[in-house]
Image (spheres, rainbow, N blue to C red):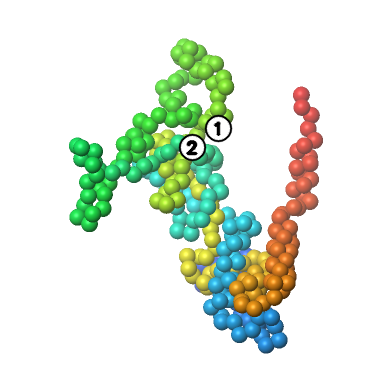
Amino acid sequence: MGYINQEKYYTNNNVNPTNENWGSYQYVSLADIVTNFLLMYNGNHSLINNEERYKILFHAKRGIQELNYDAFKEIKSLQLTVYSDLRFVLPSDFVNWVRVSMFKDNTIFPLVENIQVQSALSYVQSATATFTYDGSGNVNTKTSSLDTARQDGALNSIYLNQARMQGVDIPPFNEDYYDTYIGARYGLNTETANMNPTFTIDKKAGVINFDSTMANQECILEYISDGMENGDDSKISVNKLFEDYIYAYIKYALLNNRFGVQEYIVNRARKDKTALLRNAKIRLSDIHPGRLLMNLRGENKWIK
């Protein structure tokens, strides 16, 4: 974005939201990237000339998407309540998940992904096991018994969650504890040694399915977006540390798709792009001397 005075930065000239410009100096807008590229890299005396603006805009957005998938460390978070249907609808800009947690008693409990299937589609069948169809010729569907069992809390779990331990008192109040659970965890698969709720992500359906122990609990989803701001180009921006990389990405993409460009020119553009990405990642790696010192102090402990 363009330069603004400090009053507009801190107060947005008293226009809501007043915090709209906070931190904005770290970023350069998509519109500025396209305009700067047309001014500085596109012309009669450049390798790239007479390129349409829409092509540059397309490759700029593709470069920003690639950065969001791989290099950026800007993780979004969303907190919602999981109700009796045991589902969490994925955000509209969701691309991949980073962490799923339960927020309970002012504490964040990280959850593990369930390796068992948690939801299934069920077809309506006749008495002769043939499928039934609607008026359009599509197979009729219904709620599967698997989903019903999961939502009712009747689905058996391979995890040591609250549903499996329900009704078991802490010793010495319950003698059955010693007969049933002491020694029973020898050789336990650590992948399933989890007391918190579990989840599976159905990306096609756009939901996270939880087991019954997550009902009426608060869930926090940390996820990666593609940075496209739901299609609003005016809100798309990129960290200034990656600005030169975006220009190099656009340049390489245009040369690589142009007929008659010598291979050595394309290879040079590819190497420039790769080098700028590596440099930007190093700058954004947050290797701070204070953090390194804290880690080193943490290693210097006496084990008694």
Look at 56% across and 48% down and name the residue there. 98
Left or right, 63 with reference to 184 = right
Mark 1 lies on a secondary structure that is helix
Three-letter amino acid code at the position of disc 2: Ile
Q: Which quarter of the picture shows residue 75?
A: bottom right
- Earlier residue among tags 1 and 2: 2
Q: How many marks?
A: 2
Left or right, 31 with reference to 155 = right
Image x and y of residue 30, in percent: 58, 72
Q: CA distance from mark 1 to mark 2?
A: 9 Å
Look at 72% across and 60% down and name the residue there. 278
**Residue situated furthest bottom in the rendering:** 44
Image x and y of residue 58, in percent: 55, 72
Q: In the displayed structure, would residue 185 be above or below residue 193?
A: above
Residues packed near mark 1 inside 10 Å, few (<14), some (14 to 19) or many (20 plus): few
Q: Quadrant of the C terminus?
A: top right
Q: In the displayed structure, would residue 281 be above or below residue 184?
A: below
Look at 49% across and 70% down and name the residue there. 232
Is residue 178 something that shows in the picture? yes
- For residue 115, the mark is 2
| Residue for badge 1 | 191
